[in-house]
Image (cartoon, rainbow, N blue to C red):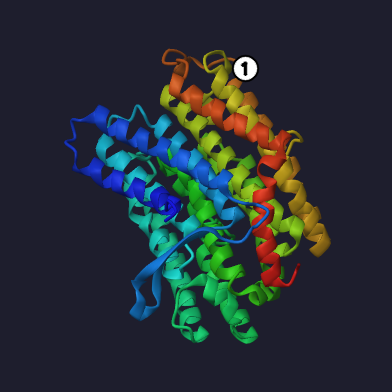
Amino acid sequence: MPVPLLSILALTPLAAGIIVLLLPAEKRSLIRGIAFATSLFTLAVSVIIFFRFDTTAGGYQFIEKMNWLPALGISYHMGVDGIGAAMELMAGIVVFSGVMVSWRVEDRPREFFAFLLFLAASVFGVFASLDLFQLFFFFELAVFPKYLMIVMWGSPKTREYGGMKLTLYLFLGSVVALIGVLAVYFTSGLRSFDMLALEQAGLALEFQRAWFLVIFVGFGVLGGLFPFHSWAPDGHVAAPTAVSMLLAGVEMKVGVFAALRAGLMLLPEGMRYWAPLILVLATINVVYGAFIAMIQKDFKYVIGFSSVSHMGLVFIGFATLTREGLTGAGLQMFSHGIMTALFFAVVGMVYDRTHTRDIRELGGLFRTMPIAMLGFVIGGLVSMGMPGFSGFIAEMPIYMGAWQTAPIVAIISALSIVITAAYILLVVRRVFFGETPEGIRAGLSDISLMDKIVVVLLSLILIVIGLFPSVLVPWIEAGVRHILVLTGGA
């Protein structure tokens, strides 16, 4: 039998997290070693899955299936299309980077790394799930680790509020999505949660239109869809660095991916019917998020609202239902995941050495942290959509798709490009250039070797995709072809 790569990818972090929890708390080196080895191993597996995926054949590959609870139509069903394979790779990169930047965590590292590994298992599982119940299982697996990591290791001033707000919003979205999932299950007549079977079931047009928003918006809450986005900046700011990287870099993609799988692909006519509303909400995401990011004084809040803005582009791409828009949305998910992980990693490095995130109290950090500054500038260029970087490769097709479907959306959302450039340049100037304030000068030091490895790794990925988009585009297009067949666009 073929090696069950997707099960290995999803279940290894889960098993490693349990092992870490069972170890004595004083075995700190062993705990860090297990977390590092697990993240490196899952990164290697995600790379193998990505490059072994046959982009010419397309469809779902690496299929694994067995009965889980056959009486209820629940199966353990794994498989990825091109978009799923790309998301697994992106998650592997971010998880590995998150472990690296958390190396110096001294407060209860056993629990910290265990919960971090549970989060990794959740995202790997969602991206590979082809059973609705299983997808929901992995989707919910992350809720308590996220909450606990924020309230235990997050910012002292905001962790209780941010953790609770995030949890309540995501619980609300999950409950709404679950109602929609059950409606699909009972209405299909198949009494099965198998998404491949449900895709072929051909649900009634009226049902698709009535229930699409319930599922898409329910999962879309985690993706930061307006007006259910406000958990994201508060949650990101309250979380410790590695969790911020995972929340913005991967977890928001989990929400959009689940909305894509359970909403657009199971209820394509519903998406076609409600696409104008999704375009309006997503356009508000893009412009509102950019304007609010520009007026923030907290370094981390700037990136938090920037994430809301950029995720709006993903929703726009999906709602265009065009080849260009869908391809751009997939590329944006990958690019934004790496870019935001880089942003939050740099913000964490700055905070660890200055003990402040107030932009007005920072300055001149390029002298002591040149690699961190370089990483933030590269992330900023990606965020601005500069040619030669992955952001341009992702955003250009989205605007092309939007122009075909709703030119006014393309015109209005393009305003965010100017606003994004403005706040990125302002932050770079205020944080990294000028004179270093007396209050932070004494404690400044360069970032560690592991931090430098993370910054260089993430930066290189963003540059390589921008210069050589063929390393990613065929995988996204392979997934898009299947979506276009379902929506009648091919």
Residue 271 in the image: state x and y as whole percent: 66, 72
Secondary structure found at label 1 = loop
Looking at this view, is 272 or 470 the one in front?
470
Could you classify mark 1 by the number of other residues whose Cα lies within 10 Å: few (under 14), some (14-19), or many (20 or more)?
few
Left or right of 246 on screen, residue 147? left
- The picture quadrant where one finds residue 434 is top right
Looking at this view, is 32 or 176 the one in front?
32
> Mark 1 — residue?
434
* Quarter of the C terminus within the rendering: bottom right
Is residue 363 among what the camera can see? no
Looking at this view, is 325 or 427 the one in front?
325
**On screen, residue 342 above or below 453:** below
Residue in the image at 40% along x and 70% along y:
75
Residue in the image at 65% along x and 24% along y:
429
* Quarter of the N terminus within the rendering: bottom left
**On screen, residue 68 above or below 104:** below
Is residue 21 among what the camera can see? yes
Residue in the image at 67% along x and 32% along y:
463
Left or right of 265 on screen, residue 167? left
